[in-house]
Image (spheres, rainbow, N blue to C red):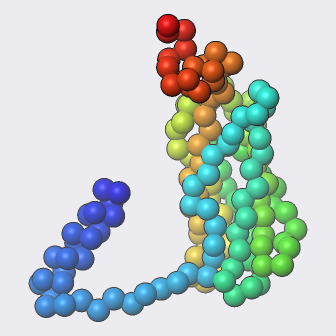
Amino acid sequence: RDLLRLINNIIDLAKVESDGLAMESVAFNLRYPKQFGFAWRNGQLLERIIRISTRRGDAPKIHRVQDPDGLLDIEVLESEGPITSIRTRVREAALEKIDDGATHELIVHTDDPDEPRLVLEYRVTAPLSRAGAAAAARGSPAGSR
């Protein structure tokens, strides 16, 4: 929100100084989640399927997917219609290195001329213990009465 506010302030200043501002609206071709997270169920981290589609209707080609922090196993799946999917799983060995709730990047290199490099943010949170989950459901800290 702060970044958006800063951009709006810069645009407003540019309008004042240039006595108006003509802006071009650009609709990019690719559709994809900018952020995602990994959820826990029954003590296991669930895999995430990231879907990337196009407005044109042809499936985007994925050249390479990078996880700079090395926390994920990544598999680009077969395209289905206008959608290309990427299966992601948190590596068991990586769980010890993860800071709870810290933001990490997944970088996807595509064949799209307007968006050849996509940066998606992801988070991995620590699982709640049963006591912590019950307390969260009640709205109180675990163990307090």
* Image coords of residue 54 (percent x, y): 69, 79
Query: Which residue is more in the foreground, 124 or 112?
Result: 124
Query: Which residue is more in the foreground, 91 or 80?
Result: 80
Q: Quadrant of residue 50?
A: bottom right
**Residue at image coords 85%, 73%:** 80
Q: Quadrant of residue 1?
A: bottom left
**Residue at image coords 52%, 84%:** 27
Note whether 83 is above or below 119 in the view shown: below
Left or right: residue 61 versus residue 133 is right
Q: Is residue 61 visible?
A: no
* Image coords of residue 34 (percent x, y): 56, 60
Q: Is residue 126 visible?
A: yes
Note whether 52 is above or below 28 in the view shown: above
**Residue at image coords 63%, 73%:** 31
Query: Which residue is more in the foreground, 141 or 124?
Result: 141
Note whether 135 is above or below 49 in the view shown: above
The tally of labels here is: 0
Left or right: residue 128 versus residue 93 is left
* Image coords of residue 51 (percent x, y): 73, 64
Left or right: residue 16 versus residue 61 is left
* Image coords of residue 118 (percent x, y): 59, 66
Q: Quadrant of residue 55?
A: bottom right
